[in-house]
């Protein structure tokens, strides 16, 4: 979603879990590293690209009730379940992700996290074994999980009927539209919130809103976002990250993954 980065050596879109297992086998036999790509949010790809294979679960996108494939659009799922009056995901309105990525990163914000709504997660290990993990076994933590090399292929959500769910969804989405640079080329929040603080507030207090390297700049709307005006490189963005970190009074850890 940042619109930067170079090519991968191989790009694979399996059409089934069996295809995914075959991809893992072939990669292992050829000693090719594998990375899993979701919607591309929360990710920065270096200008030189990615060595090895990038796998995207584009075709694994079915929804059967509250059992949802990893490639299903997470924002769509949140909207649909809110429209159905189901409580649990409405607090995550406006988060760009696929279901698999939202679970792996435990996507969330000030209103809640994905983990709270998950019942189980179906994963595939690098040797092609399918396993169903309980929420506790997933090992959810702040902006992460304990899944390691296992790949999310589907998940079940624990949602219940509630009152005012549609209204709450619209309230959260409106707040995000007002406070975040939705619709621009960005990767979401760049930094994790440090203990007891908020990364965006810290960057803002340092007077860094609008700070620029090349065609990348710190968002004027929310200081924890870096926007690509068009034509920025990954190197521009990484240099801007370094400059922010050097001027912040506390350590700021990247939330965005860098490949």
Image: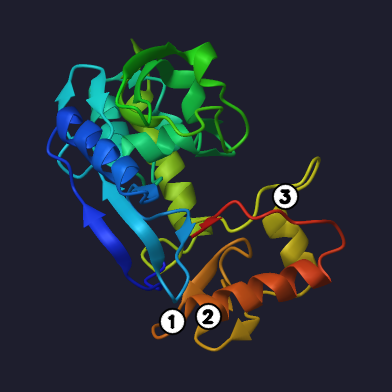
Mark 1–mark 2 distance (CA, rounded to whole Å):
6 Å
Residue designated by label 2? 216
Q: Where residue 189 sits: x, y (%)?
A: 56, 55
Residue 107 got which mark? none
Q: Quadrant of residue 15?
A: top left
Nearest to the eye among marks 2 and 3: give it. Answer: 2
Mark 1 secondary-structure assignment: loop
Q: Residues within 10 Å of mark 3 (few under 14, many from 20)?
A: some
Q: Where residue 26 sits: x, y (%)?
A: 24, 42
Above or below residue 178? Residue 4 is below
Mark 3 secondary-structure assignment: loop
Residue designated by label 3? 198
> Residue at position x 25%, y 17% from top?
66
Residue designated by label 1? 229
Mark 2–mark 3 distance (CA, rounded to whole Å):
22 Å
- For the residues labelled 1 and 3, say whether their Cβ atoms are less than 8 Å apart: no
> Residue at position x 18%, y 35% from top?
60
Mark 2 secondary-structure assignment: strand
Mark 1–mark 3 distance (CA, rounded to whole Å):
25 Å
Task: Tell me: 66 left or right of 114.
Answer: left
The residue nearer to you, when weighing 21 against 55, is 21
Q: Quadrant of residue 130?
A: top left
Residue 168 seen in this snapshot: no
Q: Residues within 10 Å of mark 1 (few under 14, many from 20)?
A: some
- For the residues labelled 1 and 2, say whether their Cβ atoms are less than 8 Å apart: yes
Residue 209 seen in this snapshot: yes
The residue nearer to you, when weighing 19 against 167, is 19
Q: Where residue 246 sits: x, y (%)?
A: 80, 71
Above or below residue 77? Residue 222 is below
Q: Quadrant of the N terminus?
A: bottom left
């Amino acid at each position: 979603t940042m619109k930067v980065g170079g090519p991968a050596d191989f790009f694979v879109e399996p059409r089934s879990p069996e295809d995914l297992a075959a991809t893992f086998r072939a990669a292992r036999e050829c000693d090719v590293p594998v990375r899993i790509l979701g919607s591309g949010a929360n990710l920065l790809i270096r200008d030189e690209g990615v060595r090895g294979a990038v796998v995207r679960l584009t075709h694994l996108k079915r929804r059967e009730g509250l059992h949802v494939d990893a490639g299903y659009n997470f924002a769509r799922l949140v909207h649909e379940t809110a429209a159905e009056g189901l409580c649990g995901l409405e607090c995550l309105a406006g988060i760009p992700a696929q279901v698999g990525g939202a679970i792996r990163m435990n996507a969330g914000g000030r209103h809640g996290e994905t983990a709270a709504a998950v019942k189980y997660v179906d994963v595939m290990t690098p040797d092609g074994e399918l396993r169903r993990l309980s929420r506790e076994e997933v090992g959810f933590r702040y902006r992460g999980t304990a899944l390691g090399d296992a790949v999310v292929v589907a998940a079940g959500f624990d949602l219940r009927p509630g009152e005012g769910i549609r209204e709450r969804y619209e309230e959260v989405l409106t707040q995000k539209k007002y406070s975040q640079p939705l619709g621009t080329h960005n990767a979401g929040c760049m930094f994790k919130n440090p203990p007891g603080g908020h990364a965006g507030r810290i960057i803002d207090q340092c007077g860094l809103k609008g700070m620029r390297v090349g065609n990348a700049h710190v968002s004027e709307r929310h200081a924890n976002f870096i926007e690509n005006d068009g034509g920025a490189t990954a190197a521009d963005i990484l240099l801007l990250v370094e400059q922010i970190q050097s001027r912040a009074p506390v350590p700021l850890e990247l939330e965005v993954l860098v490949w």
